[in-house]
Image (spheres, rainbow, N blue to C red):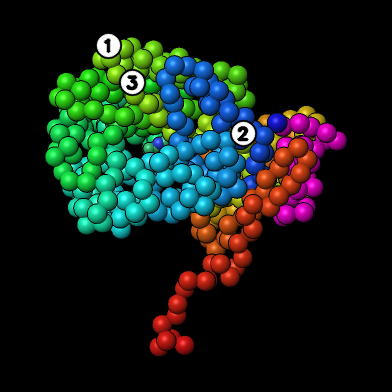
Amino acid sequence: MVKEENNHLFFGGVDVVELAERYGTPLYVTDENTLKANFRNYKSTFSSTTTITDIYYAVKANGNLALLKILASEGAGADVFSPGELELTKLAGILAERILFNGNSKSDDDLRTAVESGVRVSVDSVDELRALSAVATELGKEVEIAIRVNPDVSPDVHAKIATGLKESKFGIPFHDVVPVCEEAEKLPNVLLAGLHCHIGSQILDISVFGEATEKMMALVERVYERGMKLKFVDLGGGLGIGYRQAEKATAPTPKDLAEVILPVFEKKMQELGISLKLVLEPGRSIVGASTILLSRVNAVKRAYKNFVAIDAGFNLLIRPVMYDAYHEVVVANKVNEQASELYTVVGSVCEAGDIMAKDRMLPKVERGDLVAILDTGAYGFSMSSQYNGRPRCAEVLVCDGKVDLIRSRESIEDLIRNQEIPARFI
Ligand SMILES: *Cc1c(COP(=O)(O)O)cnc(C)c1O
C-alpha cells in the first residue's frame, strides 16, 4: 500500500504531503483497502475449513467508528471491554449475538449494560459470575457466558502484553475452570456457552497457539465428561505483525494460525463427537498495518545524538515508550533520497522517555519535513491522551485516491470542557 512518487510517500493512492497540508499534523491516516484485505484474509482462510469460525474484532485496538462500520459490513463480530466500546460496536451495526463483553473488572453497571444489550459475557472470576447471575436475575433476563481461562502458557512477547501466564491478572486458573463451570450451571439466569482465552499480543512464534488450543480442548473434554455442554471455544487474538521491514515477509499469517489451531481443535471435536464454533478475536493483525501517523519535524538538533523532534509524542503513540515497540519511520517528502545519517526521532512531550524511534538511518532531515510512522493502526489513537495539554489529532480514511475525515482534531476547548472551577475561586 505504500507507494512512492515525486519523492513523496503515497498511501491509499493519496500523496501524504498534500494530506498533511490539508488536514494539518499530527494526523492518523488509514487505508480502507488494507483494512478490508486484512479482515478478508482471516475470513477466507477460516471459511475454507470445516470448522465454523466467527471473527470478533478486538475493538480496543482501534475504536474509530468508520473502521468499525467497514469491519461490520465485512462480517466482523466484536470483542469489547467496556460499555463505551459496546456502544461503538452497536453504532457500527454489529449484532449483539456476535459481541463478547470481556474484562477482569466489571462493575454492576457494566454487567447490567451487557445483560440489557443481550451480548455474551466472558466471566473472569467467581465473584463476577455470582454478580452477573444476580444482575441478570434482577433484570429478568438470561445471559450466555464464556469462562475466561488462564491457560498458563508463555508467549515470547513483551511482558506487558503476555496475558495468559499463570501470574497474569486475566482469567480463572486452569484447574479451577471445571468447578466454576459447575457453579455456573447451578446459578440462575447464566447459561454456560463457551470457554475463552487470550494468551498475549504481538505473537510471532505461533507454536504457543497450538499449546493453548491443546489446553483449552483438554478443558472442553473435562467439561463434557461432567455432563455439561458448550457452543463455542474462543481462542482470543494476539497474532503478531511485521513491524520491522525485515519481519514483513516472515510474520505469521491467518493461514499459519489456522494450521496450528485447527488440527488440534478438530481432532478433539472428533474424539468427543461434538461440534463447536471457533471464535477468534484479532485486533492488531487487522488494523495494525492499515494506518500511518504523519508528523511534522519541528527541530533537528545535533547534540549527544542527532535528534529529530516531531509534533507527535507518546500522547498520540505510546507503543514505543510503553512496550519498547519498533515502528518504521519514513521521511515522507524525501522517499527517494538516500538514507545518509543516523537519527533518533523524539516526540513533543515533556518527558525524557518520549522517544519514538532510536538510531535510524534516514535521509538528511530538516525542520518542516514530514515524517510517517508506519503500522500505527493498532493501539495508536485508541491509547492516545491529552497529556501535556495537547488536543488529540485528526484521523482520515483514504481509499484509491479518495479522502474522508473520520475524526476531527480536538481543540483547546476540548481540554477544558469538563473542568469546573469551584465557585469560591471565581
Ligand atoms: C486485546 C485483546 C485481543 C486482541 O489482541 P491483538 O493482539 O490485538 O490481536 C483479543 N482478545 C482479548 C480478550 C483481548 O484482551
Relative side of 263 to 273, left or right:
right
Q: Is residue 315 above or below residue 160?
A: below
Pick the quarter of the image with the N terminus: top right
Q: Which residue is mark 3?
A: 275
Q: Please name the amino acid that badge 1 sits on.
A: Glu
Give the Cα separation between the discs numbered 3 and 1.
Answer: 11 Å
Furthest-front residue in this view = 140
Disc 2 is placed on an element classified as helix
Give the Cα separation between the discs numbered 2 and 1.
Answer: 36 Å
Mark 2 or mark 1, earlier in chain: 2
Residue plotted at (74% across, 50% down): 20
Q: Which residue is mark 1?
A: 271
Furthest-right residue in this view = 6
Residue plotted at (63% across, 59% down): 409
Q: Is residue 354 above or below residue 139?
A: above
Disc 3 is placed on an element classified as loop
Disc 1 is placed on an element classified as helix
Viewer-proximal residue among 229 and 357: 229
Determine whether the beta carbon of the residue marked 1 sits less than 8 angstroms from the nearest atom of ligand 1: no
Q: Which mark is residue 36?
A: 2
Residue 265 in the image: state x and y as whole percent: 35, 17
Total numbered circles:
3
Q: Is residue 349 above or below residue 275?
A: below
- Magenta segment: 2-25
Residue plotted at (78% across, 40% down): 401
| Residue 169 visible in the current orientation | no
